[in-house]
Amino acid sequence: MNKNDKPKLARSMQVRFKCRPLSLGHASTIAERPHMDIGIFIPIGNNGWLISSNAPQYMPTFDLNKQIVQKAEHYGFDFALSMIKLRGFGGKTQFWEHNLESFTLMAGLAAVTSKIQLFATVATLTIPPAIAARMASTIDSISNGRFGINLVTGWQKPEYEQMGLWPGDEFFHTRYEYLAEYAQVLRDLWATGSSDFQGEHFSMQDCRVSPRPKADMKLICAGQSEAGMAFSAQYADYNFCFGKGVNTPTAFAPTAQKLIEANEQTGRNVTSCVLFMIIADDTDEAARARWEHIKEGADEEAIAWLSDKGSADKSAGSNLRQMADPTSAVNINMGTLVGSWANVAKMLDEVASVPGTQGVMLTFDDFVKGVEDFGQKIQPLMSSRSHILPLKEVV
């Protein structure tokens, strides 16, 4: 590809590679979806996704994440994804001040799992696309074709300023053009083993990567702004979005609909995966009490830092605005399902009913116990997971 043919996030963009909708498990058509995929957003940073002194306090380790992912695989989870975070929020809980690195963690997990699909996140300002392509091909070999990449542009300026990699605040407005070129280089290298791509941000001169992945390498993104949705519809196989509110499982439906509309401009069928936190117990009352206790311990200093840095990107999509909203930032404002095992199962089935939804990605207050409880007490009650275990009658 030469400079005149560089990617453009526009209606007239030509798709240069053949893609099909991502199938992390047993995907079906949007119109007739008998089930949905389940993934886990593993705790690569300290304390997972709860900015609270009343939540479990722990450091991220390989052994912890190995235990979580192996349990998830045992219970039929379809995929596991790790984020990348290079600087935390501070506060008394030192939220996300301690983080593992995503690619090396997933390489280790690839060697100790056999079925579950694995996704690492690349902070695209830190790793050139040709290096990311080679790293991904290596983990593809370790995992026997179970690996893919989550692409992030970077919204937290201090993460990159600290190492001299922040390109300037204009990047907030051009980041998806940058990401489109990044994705095109990846696709070229994986498809043919070489790239001569010439763009505004990247220049390849007979750049080569071999061996190439044995499996169809998947790209995922979390675009929610207009530009982000256009990028996902053009380049991603799967788009992540936040669930919204507490016990409002279908409130994200307008976001999923926007992706369906963006697909109409590209002729592709990119589906949504929705992020939810699960707080479940024997009764609704017990689950609600746990959730209220977590909120009472909110680390206000860390939350204020998140709100301040999140407001720096004036072009941010709804995900970032939702994360930084102080209303319920104790879990970064991700959608939260609080209740008994049966009621959480019912709400997850409601998620599956939203058009364009292929799956959910789950977090828990206590990940080890949470995965165990989900596998034993929630999943067997879900009609959207009846392919994993026989559906149990809910009394």
Image (cartoon, helix red, strand yellow):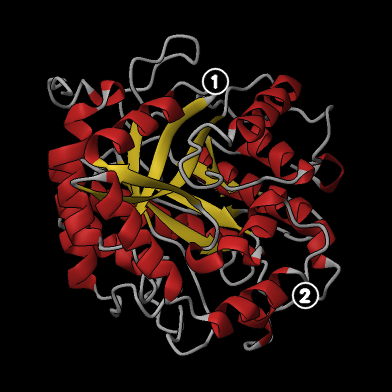
The quarter of the picture where the C terminus appears is top left
Quarter where residue 351 is shown: top left
Residue at 28% over, 74% down: 56
Q: Is residue 228 left or right of residue 128?
A: right
Side of 166 where 173 appears, left or right: right
The quarter of the picture where residue 379 lies is: top left
Above or below for 375 versus 265: below
Local SS, label 2: loop
| Position of residue 172 in the picture relative to residue 92 (left or right) | right
Residue 171 placement (x, y as % from top left): 80, 66
Which residue appears farthest toward the front when viewing the image? 285
Q: Which residue is mark 2?
A: 167
Residue drawn at x 82%, y 76% as measured from the top left: 168
The amino acid type of the residue labelled 2 equals Pro
x and y percentages locating residue 193 in the rendered image: 50, 45
Crowding at dot 1, Cα within 10 Å, few <14 / some 14-19 / many 20+, comes out as some
**Tag 1 secondary structure:** loop
Q: Badge 1 is on which residue?
A: 355
**Is 320 positioned to the left or the right of 285 in the image?**
right
Q: Name the residue type under label 1.
A: Pro
Of 145 and 275, nearer the camera is: 275
